[in-house]
Amino acid sequence: MNALVNLQYAKLLTEKDHQLLPPLLAATLANVARFDTWRIAIVDTDCDVSVIDFRNNLRTDNSEHGVDLSADMIPEVAHKAIGDGFYNSQELAPRGLQRTEYYEQSLKHGLVLTDHAGYVAKVDEENTICISFSRSDHYSMFTEAENDKFRAISPLILHALRLIWKAWSADPKNTIELRARTARTRLDAALQSFGFTTLTPRERDVAQLLVSGHSAKAIARVLDIGPGTARNHIKHIYLKLGLSSRSELFSRYVKELMLCQTA
């Protein structure tokens, strides 16, 4: 490992200002090989992405956190739990980077990519932290030697990513966000599994709207069906589940939610 990487990593480990950890990590990687843009993000099991930090040195439209970069392959690797470590573009896009949706998304925002790579580190049962970085047409692709260096420092980078996660998740406002996201995940899971083995797909749609507080008329409007059809679906739902009222339906849903919470 070269001296510059060692020095930068030492700075990363001793930095007290947690907001400086992401750029210090990027600087450590840049001492292996230069790149134009990078993004550090948390990916949960629902594939919700929370961007911790983002830079684009080219100052294109792609410089804002809110830009749609949902096709980035690194968060996809994180979501699929393929494994911790370094991934280069040949592994991420075997058919070629230019044939990926991510390339097309970046192009729309003024960034012409020649290469893309990143690291993935699982931090708990729900969340994975990752850093992805790209080269524009100002550079050629990362060389085999550069990719080998990125792999060689994987243990250091994964440790640094977990330091960033630890600092980020300790922030009260981020803890609240994580709890809210977990709560939404459980609610969604309960709704999706509610009556799964008994109801038809359309009846499950109606049941989900019922427990969300919609009336028969509102359900008809949301699902673009007639009010009479909505009422028939509700009647079949009650019959199949052995229920006689919305309150009983809601009680059944609460039991499903409690099962999801203890799963």
Image (cartoon, grey):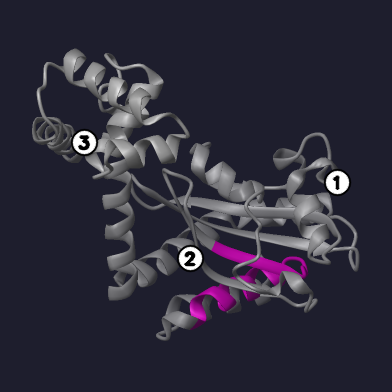
Locate residue 15, reporting x and y percent: 45, 83
| Mark seen at residue 98 | 1
Circle nearer the N terminus (3, 2): 2
Locate residue 150, reporting x and y percent: 67, 56
Magenta residues (range):
20-40
Residue at 83% x, 67% y is: 110
Q: Are marks 3 and 1 in contact (CB under 8 Å)?
A: no
| Mark seen at residue 160 | 2
Q: Amino acid at mark 1?
A: Gln
Identify the secondary structure beneath mark 1.
helix
Q: In front: mark 3 or mark 1?
A: 3
Q: Amino acid at mark 2?
A: Ala
Q: Are marks 3 and 2 in contact (CB under 8 Å)?
A: no
Question: Is residue 31 located in the magenta-colored stretch of the structure?
Answer: yes
Looking at the image, residue 10 sits to the left or right of residue 123; the answer is right
Q: In which quadrant is the C terminus drawn?
A: top left
Residue at 57% x, 42% y is: 77
151 in relation to 238, above or below: below
Question: Is residue 234 located in the magenta-colored stretch of the structure?
Answer: no
Locate residue 216, reporting x and y percent: 29, 35
